C-alpha cells in the first residue's frame, strides 16, 4: 500500500503543468482574487462552496498561479485518497482488498485527472473518503461513537461541493438501516451533521447569484456515463462539444470499450456483494446508491445540472466494492469457473483503467480548448491593439485570462443562445472594431450558438476573410457589408 501511494503520487505529477488552464480553472483564479475580507460570501455568491478556494488562495500566495502550482492542492487531495480508500476496504473486506483498493485508487484515471485540475473535486473525494472511513470504523465496532471528527468531515464535504449532501444522505441512510446500539452513540452526531449541512446548503442557495451557473442536459446515457467516468475518467468519453453536436451518437467511438467493461464490472460487483457481510453491503450500497441516484432525482424535480465531476464523493464506496470483487479471499478461496470469471473481469477492468490513465497523461488537455494554437494565430494575424469580438461570457473569461494584454468585447451580450427571432437584428448590429474587418472568436459554442445558426447568419450577411479553426475555438473574420440592400453596422 505504501508502494501504491508512492506510485500514485508520482503519476499525478506527470505532465502536471503541461496543459494551459482551461475555463473552469481560470474560474478558480477568478475566485482566489477576491480579498480575504468577505471572501466566503463572494465565493458563495457564485454558487461555489468556499473550502477549496480558501485552500487554493492560501497556497497560491506561496506557490504562485502557474498551471502546475494551481493544481497542487488537488494533487495532494487526490493522492491522500489512496490510503483512505485502502483503509475503508481493509475494514470491510480484509487486507488483500485493501491492497487492491490502494492500487486501483493510485492508477484511477478519474482521480488522476481531478488531481491535475485546479478545481474542488479531488478535495471533495478526499473529505468523502475520510468521512466514510470514520463511519465504517463506527459501524464495524472499531470506535464506540460517531463524534466531532465525523461531523467536521461532513461539514468539509458540504463546504467543498454542495452536491456532497447526497453522499451524506447515503451515510444517514446506512445509519438508519443498521441502527447501531446504543442510539446515543450516533444519533446526536447525525442530527448535528445533518443540521449543519442542510443549513450550509440553504445559506448557499440564499446567496447564489447564478452568474456563472452552468446547465447540462440530461441524456439517456447520463446515469451509466457517471459510473463509467468514475472508473475511467474522461478520455474514453465524448467531450461536451461532441455531445452537444452529435447527441447520443457521440458515444459510439467509445461504446465498444464500455460494452466490454460493463460485464466485467457486473461480475466484480456481484462477487463483492457475495463476499461482504451485511453491514458492509449496507454501507457501500447506501452511500454509493444514494450519491449516484439522488442528483438525478434532484435534476428531474428542480432542473439542476448534473455532471460526472459532481459525483466525486461516490468514488470511495464504488472502488471499495470493485476492490472487494477483484481481491481473492483471505484464504484464497476463489476457485472454479466463478474464480476464473472474476480474474478475467479484474484483468479487463485494470487494462481499461490503465489505458485511460495513459491517454490522459499523454494529453492532459484532452477535449479542452487549444489555447496555444489560438494564441499563435492571434499573434501572427491580429495586432495587439485590435479589439476582438467574443461569443460568450464563458469564453470571454477564458480569453481575458490567457491574453490579458488584448482587448475583447462580448458579442452578442445575451447569456446563452439567441432566439431565432433575434438573430437577424443582432447580426445587423454587429460592431466592426476595425474599419476593414471584425475578428469574432467563437468558443464553447454549445452555450452561445449550439446549432451554429448565428454564425451562419453572420456569414450570409457579411463577406468573410481568413480565420482559423482549432480544437474548441473558431476564429472568424468578417468584412463590413457592401451590399446596399443591407446597411452596414456602425462601430
Image: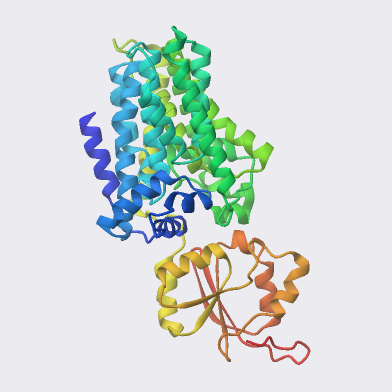
Residue 266 seen in the current view = no
Give me the residue at 61% from left, 48% from top.
249
Give me the residue at 78% from left, 68% from top.
421
Tell me the quarter of the image containing the C terminus.
bottom right
The spot of residue 111 in percent (x, y) is: 38, 40
Q: Is residue 33 left or right of residue 417?
A: left
Tell me the quarter of the image containing the N terminus.
top left
The spot of residue 247 in percent (x, y) is: 63, 50
Q: Residue furthest top?
A: 181
The spot of residue 16 in percent (x, y) is: 30, 53
Residue 464 seen in the current view = yes
Which residue is more in the foreground, 11 or 74?
74
Q: Give the tally of numbered discs.
A: 0
Give me the residue at 42% from left, 10% from top.
277
Q: Is residue 421 above or below residue 39?
A: below
Give me the residue at 49% from left, 48% from top.
48
Q: Is residue 214 left or right of residue 65?
A: right
Q: Is residue 248 above or below residue 484?
A: above
Q: Is residue 86 left or right of residue 469?
A: left
Q: Residue furthest front?
A: 37
- Quadrant of residue 326 in the image? top left
Q: Is residue 142 above or below residue 287?
A: above
What colour scheme was applied to this rendering of the protein?
A: rainbow
The spot of residue 166 in percent (x, y) is: 53, 31
Which residue is more in the foreground, 178 or 200?
200
- Quadrant of residue 342 in the image? top left
Amino acid at each position: 500500500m505504501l508502494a501504491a501511494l508512492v506510485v500514485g503520487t508520482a503519476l499525478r505529477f506527470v505532465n502536471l503543468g503541461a496543459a494551459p488552464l482551461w475555463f473552469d480553472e481560470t474560474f478558480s483564479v477568478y475566485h482566489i482574487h477576491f480579498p480575504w475580507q468577505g471572501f466566503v460570501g463572494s465565493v458563495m455568491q457564485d454558487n461555489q462552496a468556499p473550502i477549496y478556494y480558501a485552500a487554493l488562495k492560501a497556497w497560491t500566495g506561496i506557490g504562485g498561479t502557474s498551471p502546475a502550482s494551481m493544481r497542487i492542492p488537488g494533487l495532494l487531495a487526490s493522492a491522500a485518497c489512496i490510503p483512505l480508500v485502502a483503509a475503508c476496504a481493509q475494514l470491510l473486506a480484509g487486507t488483500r482488498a485493501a491492497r487492491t483498493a490502494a492500487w486501483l485508487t493510485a492508477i484511477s484515471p478519474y482521480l488522476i485527472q481531478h488531481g491535475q485540475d485546479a478545481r474542488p473535486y479531488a478535495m471533495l473525494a478526499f473529505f468523502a473518503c475520510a468521512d466514510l472511513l470514520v463511519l465504517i470504523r463506527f459501524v464495524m465496532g472499531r470506535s464506540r461513537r460517531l463524534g466531532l471528527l465525523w461531523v467536521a468531515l461532513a461539514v468539509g464535504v458540504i463546504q467543498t461541493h454542495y452536491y456532497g449532501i447526497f453522499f451524506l444522505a447515503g451515510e444517514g441512510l446506512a445509519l438508519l438501516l443498521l441502527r447501531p446500539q446504543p442510539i446515543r452513540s450516533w444519533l446526536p452526531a447525525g442530527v448535528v451533521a445533518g443540521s449543519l449541512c442542510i443549513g450550509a446548503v440553504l445559506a448557499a442557495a440564499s446567496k447564489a447569484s447564478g452568474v456563472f451557473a452552468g446547465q447540462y442536459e440530461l441524456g439517456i446515457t447520463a446515469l451509466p456515463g457517471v459510473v463509467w467516468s468514475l472508473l475511467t475518467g474522461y478520455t474514453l468519453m465524448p467531450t461536451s462539444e461532441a455531445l452537444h453536436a452529435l447527441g447520443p451518437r457521440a458515444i459510439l467511438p467509445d461504446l465498444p470499450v464500455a460494452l466490454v467493461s460493463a460485464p466485467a464490472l457486473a461480475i466484480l460487483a456481484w462477487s463483492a456483494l457475495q463476499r461482504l457481510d451485511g453491514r458492509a453491503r449496507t454501507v457501500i450500497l447506501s452511500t454509493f446508491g444514494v450519491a449516484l441516484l439522488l442528483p438525478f432525482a434532484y435534476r428531474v424535480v428542480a432542473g439542476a445540472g448534473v455532471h460526472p465531476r459532481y459525483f466525486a464523493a461516490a468514488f470511495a464506496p464504488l472502488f471499495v466494492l470493485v476492490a472487494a470483487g477483484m481481491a481473492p479471499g483471505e484464504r484464497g478461496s476463489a476457485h472454479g469457473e466463478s474464480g476464473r470469471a472474476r480474474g478475467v473481469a479484474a484483468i479487463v477492468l485494470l487494462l481499461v483503467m490503465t489505458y485511460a490513465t495513459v491517454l490522459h497523461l499523454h494529453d492532459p488537455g484532452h477535449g479542452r480548448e487549444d489555447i496555444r494554437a489560438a494564441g499563435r494565430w492571434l499573434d501572427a494575424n491580429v495586432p495587439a491593439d485590435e479589439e476582438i469580438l467574443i461569443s460568450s461570457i464563458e469564453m470571454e473569461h477564458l480569453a481575458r485570462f490567457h491574453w490579458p494584454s488584448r482587448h475583447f468585447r462580448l458579442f452578442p451580450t445575451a447569456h446563452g443562445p439567441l432566439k431565432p427571432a433575434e438573430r437577424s437584428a443582432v447580426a445587423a448590429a454587429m460592431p466592426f472594431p476595425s474599419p476593414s474587418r471584425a475578428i469574432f472568436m467563437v468558443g464553447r459554442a454549445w452555450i452561445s450558438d449550439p446549432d451554429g445558426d448565428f454564425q451562419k447568419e453572420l456569414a450570409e450577411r457579411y463577406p468573410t476573410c481568413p480565420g482559423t479553426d482549432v480544437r474548441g475555438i473558431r476564429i472568424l473574420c468578417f468584412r463590413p457589408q457592401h451590399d446596399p440592400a443591407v446597411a452596414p453596422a456602425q462601430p
